[in-house]
Amino acid sequence: MTKNRKCPVCEQPLPDPSAVARAEKNLEKLSAKREAEFQRQLETELRRAERTAEAKARKQYEAKLKSVEEAAATKARTEERRRQDRLQDQLMRQNDELRRKLERLTADEKGEIGEADIRRALQEAFPTDIIERIGKSRGSADIRHEVREQGRTCGVIIYEVKNVAKWSTDYLKQARKSLALHHGAQAVLVSTAFPAGKKYLTFEKDVAVVHPTIVASVVRALRQVIVVRGAATAGTHAERSRKADKLLQFVKSDEYRRGMKAVAESIADLIRLQGKERQQHDRTWAAQSDLYRAVEQGHAAVDSRVAQIVSGVPLSLVKDDEDADETAAG
């Protein structure tokens, strides 16, 4: 006789002995399903954790990269400021030296010394270029500037230097004539006088009119235009021309002129400040000189009296001399 199977829960006899087997099978299926679901959840969590870790690592990398880029940009800006400061100091020294020389020269001599100082400033700024003063017997220009890059000539800049108090359009005609005569790429009129309403930097069509204090800075940009246009290995001729035209357009823009005007005004302010300091210094030296003379005169008077006493002059006579001196001084 087959023993009746009992329910493992309520201990009651089971009418169907195979029910337990089916229940166990169902439990196994349910357990397997739960195990599979657990594995899926575990894999999902692992993938989520990997993505989170990857995103965190990427964020940290981007932050680090940004920090490095900002540091590099800050360093570049600092170096550029230092370079501009050095250039500004150099221009200030040149301008100060030129001013002192101009104070000692006649009107005719002023033009000559202006050309010499402009040429020297350009040569210091562009040591690899060939920059020479041109005597009037060799042509109408004052300075010829051959732009050299990697051992080859890219173009020529022609300069007319005018240290004048009043502007004249004849200066432009002379600059254009010189440009054509020397087959130049750019004409620069270095002038202390400007057209009405203009100051420090302006372009009169094809001629750049530049104040002496910023000539090296402006020529640096104009020189780059010539180098880009004349480079033999930097793209096609059309590409170089487009890039050079774009750069020249920027140099002629209000934005660039405002920047150069700010530089020139800062130099002018520094020069004025130096002038005030020099005047104060001169006044101090004059006062010190007066005091030194007073000291020397006092010493001389005392030494004279001592000499008189030593030589046997009676004190009464010395006193009379002193009274006479005081009366004369009064």
Image: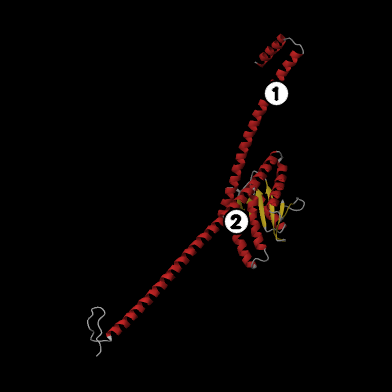
Residue 183 in which image quadrant: bottom right
The answer to whether one can see residue 214 in this image is yes
In the displayed structure image, the side of residue 68 where residue 298 appears, left or right: right
Q: Quadrant of the N terminus?
A: bottom left
Q: Nearer the viewer, residue 30 or 121?
A: 30
x and y percentages locating residue 179 in the rendered image? 69, 56
Q: Residue at x 51, y 62 (%)?
A: 61
Q: Which disc number belongs to residue 251?
A: 2
State whether residue 2 is above or below residue 307. Answer: below
Amino acid type, callout 2 = Val
Q: SS at mark 2? A: helix
Residue 39 in which image quadrant: bottom left
State whether residue 88 is above or below residue 54. Answer: above
Furthest residue toward bottom: 1
Amino acid type, callout 1 = Glu
Q: Residue at x 48, y 62 (%)?
A: 59
Residue 153 in which image quadrant: bottom right
